[in-house]
Image (cartoon, rainbow, N blue to C red):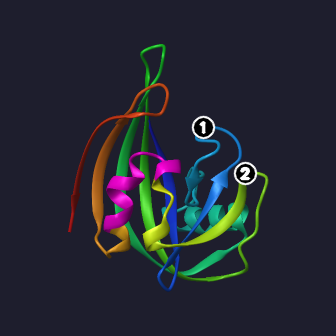
Amino acid sequence: MEQIFTLAVILREDQVLLARKLRSFGAGKWVGFGGKVERGESVEEAMVRECGEEVGVFPTASQAAGSLLTEHLQANGEVDQHRVYLFLVTDFEGVPRASDEMGSPTWFSFEDIPYDEMWESDRVWLPRVLRGERVEGEFVFDEWGGMVEHEIVSS
């Protein structure tokens, strides 16, 4: 069953805001902000809520940047599917702060993004989104979170 998620790429001039994920799947990686869409929420409402919960900022201007279908292969042979709707956030209220889920919110220049400490798929889609492209992609990950295959198109 496909679960619906959001992911916000928060910008300030030529910088992107990332934080270290503190718990759960992907702990220790630098990530953007987002999560599961709750019943009755639009994907945009979920994105705003998740940004507030995770890093204390509330997007006031954003645009859809595409979507990613991720498949996570499990040791028991099952596959978890997530549809992740991407948003490019260009304005927000609040000051970035750590939370129980996200530590060390940090602004990175586009040239200094720590891709080697992020999901492998981020190297594929994030540069395109930062260039203003809209992306549609599919990524398959093994049970340890390694990228097995991918396909991506942008417009």
Name the residue nearer the viewer: 30 or 75: 30
Q: Is residue 117 magenta?
A: yes
The residue positioned 58% from the left and 48% from the top of the image is 29
Q: Quadrant of residue 57?
A: bottom right
Amino acid type shown at disc 2: Glu
**Observer able to see residue 92:** yes
Q: Which residue is the site of mark 1?
A: 25
Q: Secondary structure at mark 2?
A: loop
Asked whether the beta carbons under mark 1 and mark 2 sit within 8 Å of each other, the answer is: no
Residue extending furthest toward the right? 100
The answer to whether residue 60 is left or right of residue 113 is right
Counting from the top left corner in percent of width and height, residue 50 is at 64, 61
* Quarter occupied by residue 58: bottom right
Magenta part mainly helix, strand or loop?
Answer: helix
Write the start and end of the magenta stretch as one range: 116-128
Q: Amino acid at mark 1?
A: Phe
Q: What residue is drawn where x is 29% and y is 62%?
A: 135
In the rendered view, tell whether residue 66 sits above or below residue 94: above
User: What residue lies at 32% left-to-right and 76% top-to-bottom?
Assistant: 132
Picture disc at residue 123: none
Instruction: List the residue tagged with mark 2.
Output: 101
* Residue drawn at the location 39% of the way across and 70% of the way down: 64
Q: Position of residue 92 (x, y in %)?
A: 61, 82
